[in-house]
Image (cartoon, rainbow, N blue to C red):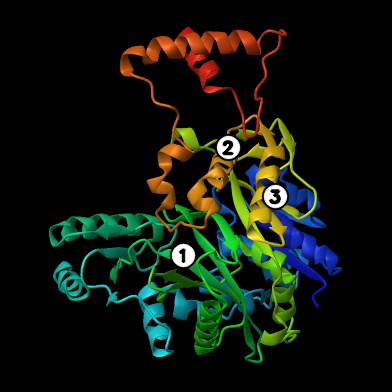
Amino acid sequence: MFKKVLVANRGEIAVRIIRTLHELGVQAVAVYSDADRAALHVRMADEAWNIGPAPARESYLDISRVLDAAKRSGAQAIHPGYGFLSENPTFADACERAGVVFVGPPASAMRSLGSKPAARAVMAAAGVPIVPGAASGTVEELLSAAERVGYPVMLKAASGGGGKGMRLVDRPEELPGAYERAQSEALKAFGDATVYLEKAVVRPRHVEIQVLGDREGNVVHAFERDCSIQRRHQKVLEETPSPAVTPELVARMGEVAVKGARAVGYHSAGTFEFLLGADGNFYFLEMNTRLQVEHPVTELVTGLDLVREMLRVASGEPLGFTQESVVRRGHAVECRVYAEDPSSGFLPSPGRIEALRTPAGPGVRDDGGAYPGCEISSFYDPLISKLSTWAPDRPRCLARMARALREYVVTGIRTNLAFHQRLLEHPDFQAGHYDTGFLERHKSALVDWPEVKDADAEAWAVCAAVAASRLEGANGTEREGVGPGAGPSPWVRAHRARLG
């Protein structure tokens, strides 16, 4: 095992990796930008190195600065976490040239799977089912492919992710305009305007399989996660087991994922993402060649420490278990807690956290990177923490999560805690009846304020604002929050705006 490892990331994932390093008796080296000088991961590490200004491209994405910090600190390996440089094969190659171990898969596997059209071809050759479609081409070629597979179709950025460069097309006449917009967005987001086409699977579930492999060719899967609760193709809540699958289906998906990983010589942790149709057929979507944000739910039900296994494999050790010995118990759910305002279109809510109380108790895990008084920066993703719960079955797990959300208190900024509470209370979610379009269909029930007739709206808002302001100022001080995720109430803000 290594003696010193640099964590090339920030926030909650850096904190989570540092904890495992310390359990293993390994020294943890943090890197930080100017904006993260007082961040929790910096405080927890054994040593920390500044790598540049706040913009990620000048710090966390700067390969030379990260490697310079590794050299100066004497780190033997670099764990990239997720995001930033975690799926960059150029970075993996640079680590090898610098004599530093990259804690992740080989660069060759990342290159095979980094381009979605190329990944589709590799997986199809390995016998992994893929969604019918076509590789990138001209508008005319894509129109012909769409006619062949049938509408609706989805245009996707070849180098993309997170919903960027994606367009749903229902009719032929919509395709040229959608193609142009998808190309433009893909070029801006990823520096690559390549767009390909897939048959759109109507109301699918997004189900993924966790895999682990070592350098000796051993590969196992650690069951599935259901990530269908999404907003604009960004995951919001994840759970395992999925309410929509049978053990037999999971076994088939796991076998396919293992076969796909072996086809590209994969080692370390990785995730195969599939679209699951209502008919039970599943199709390869992409492979994430890194640790996933939602990995805690897998750890809770299997007892594995995925970060530990990544470090063991990177140090040359074989997997310490076989497929038969990977078992799971109970049910786990994860809610992503963001500094954002759902009532304002989920706009980020950066700022200083005044008070923070995280939930605890049996079966509760909070992977956080914040503390009272810390700043949630506008330069990075506004994820505060990942709240996960475990219980012997799904109903008790959801009840435990609802309790934990009620205990969670953040003041000074807005959060999506109340949104998660509403989501867990929704009868269709409780019944497990959801797909990737669930949040959009139920938006009004989950995030919208009650509607007020236009003629009465202004008078009603002013009256409510004055009453709320007087109530909150009754003790001579103004409270900046009275519940989970609360900052100044909308009524107080409206009153302040009218007063100038």
Residue count near mark 3 (Cα–Cα under 10 Å), binned few <14, some 14–19, many ≥20: many
Residue 174 in the image, given as x and y percentages of width and height: 17, 57
Can residue 427 be seen at all in this image of the molecule?
A: yes
Q: Which residue is mark 3?
A: 400
Would residue 232 be found to the left or right of residue 272 on screen? Answer: left
Point out the frontmost of discs 3 and 2: 3
Specify which label sits upstream in the sequence, 3 or 1: 1
Q: Nearer the viewer, mark 3 or mark 1?
A: 3
Q: CA distance from mark 2 to mark 1?
A: 24 Å
Camera sees residue 500: no
218, 382: nearer the viewer: 218
> Residue drawn at (44%, 48%), measured in percent from left and top?
439
Asked if the residue at tag 1 contacts the one at tag 3, i.e. Cβ–Cβ closer than 8 Å, the answer is no
Which sits in the foreground, 352 or 204?
204
- Check residue 418 in the rendering and tell me which mark sits there, or answer none: 2
Q: First in sequence, mark 2 or 1: give its number.
A: 1
What SS does tag 1 mark?
A: strand
Amino acid type for the residue under numbered disc 3: Arg
Q: Residue at point 40% right, 9% down?
A: 459
The amino acid pointed to by label 1 is His
In this view, 282 is above or below 406: below
Q: Quadrant of the N terminus?
A: bottom right
Spatial distance from mark 3 to mark 1, Cα to Cα? 24 Å
Which residue is situated farthest in the bottom direction here?
A: 216
Q: Is residue 481 above or below residue 129?
A: above
The percent coordinates of residue 407 (x first, y second) are 72, 39
Q: Which residue is mark 1?
A: 206
Hey, which quadrant is residue 31 in on the image? bottom right
Given contact means CB atoms under 8 Å apart, are the residues at marks 3 and 2 in contact? no
